């Protein structure tokens, strides 16, 4: 497996391309991601969103139409894909598959697991592929996602952190912003964040 990463837009939101078994999966195509993605894929099979905030989904629809591949979005955040209240120029996007809860998917022979961790937003998820997880805006290196936005929930964030602490297998985490970390490293930080909530 090869992972390509490119920070996009004003918020330097990480867009990822996962190359595996001769296929590519695109994760969180943000502002201005289209040309970079098109230059780096030859056999794309899906677009995945960790959550629905504009800086992670901006190029969803454009890529979906250019590449003729399905878009997977956590169900709780589907309304955010067409809600321009907080970002008036947001290009609306429409998922082919609404992913609900903790789900294991088979994408052309590639196992992809969505782990639902609401708090930052209703659909916030981490996406597991092989020995890595794309943590979106749930977990960062030594930090967690904000929980003071519209649609955020501090109580859900507490539950998600408690759930995350129970995960038994270490994984490399690729967040929505900044550099990589590991699940076990962020588990060590969880009690601190729980006290802060």
Image (tube, helix red, strand yellow):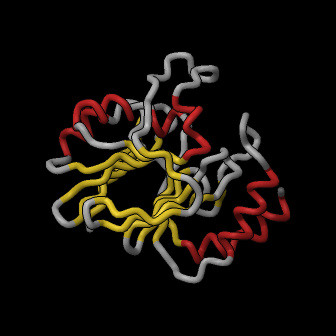
- 117 vs 22, left or right, is right
- Residue 188, relative to residue 138: is it above or below? below
Residue sitting nearer the eye, 109 or 117? 109
Residue sitting nearer the eye, 32 or 42? 42
Residue sitting nearer the eye, 137 or 48? 48
Q: Quadrant of the N terminus?
A: bottom left
- 29 vs 189, left or right, is left
Q: Quadrant of residue 94?
A: top left
Residue 177 visible (yes or no): no
Number of numbered tags placed on the structure image: 0
Residue sitting nearer the eye, 124 or 30? 124
Q: Quadrant of residue 53?
A: top right
Q: Quadrant of residue 96?
A: top left
Residue drawn at (60%, 74%) of the image: 185
Residue 146 image position (x, y, % from top left): 69, 46
Residue drawn at (76%, 41%) of the image: 148
Residue 114 visible (yes or no): yes
- Residue 110, relative to residue 149: is it above or below? below
Residue 109 image position (x, y, % from top left): 26, 66
- Residue 66, relative to residue 116: is it above or below? above
Outermost residue on the bottom side: it is 168
Q: Quadrant of the C terminus?
A: bottom right
Residue drawn at (24%, 64%) of the image: 20
Residue 128 image position (x, y, % from top left): 45, 66
Residue drawn at (56%, 53%) of the image: 100
């Amino acid at each position: 497996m090869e992972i390509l990463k490119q920070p996009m837009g004003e918020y330097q939101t990480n867009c990822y391309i996962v190359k595996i078994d001769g296929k590519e999966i695109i994760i969180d195509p943000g502002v201005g991601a289209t040309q970079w993605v098109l230059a780096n894929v030859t056999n794309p099979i899906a677009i995945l969103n960790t959550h629905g905030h504009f800086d992670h989904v901006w190029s969803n629809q454009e890529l979906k139409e250019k590449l003729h591949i399905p878009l997977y979005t956590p169900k709780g955040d589907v309304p955010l894909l067409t809600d321009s209240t907080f970002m008036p120029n947001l290009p609306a996007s429409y998922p082919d598959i609404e992913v609900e809860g903790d789900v294991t998917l088979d994408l052309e022979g590639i196992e992809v697991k969505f782990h639902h961790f609401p708090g930052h937003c209703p659909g916030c998820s981490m996406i597991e592929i092989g020995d890595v997880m794309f943590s979106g805006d749930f977990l960062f290196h030594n930090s967690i996602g904000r929980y003071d936005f519209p649609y955020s929930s501090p109580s859900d964030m507490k539950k998600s952190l408690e759930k995350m602490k129970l995960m038994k297998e270490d994984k490399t985490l690729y967040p929505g912003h900044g550099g990589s970390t590991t699940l076990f490293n962020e588990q060590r930080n969880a009690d601190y964040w729980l006290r802060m909530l």
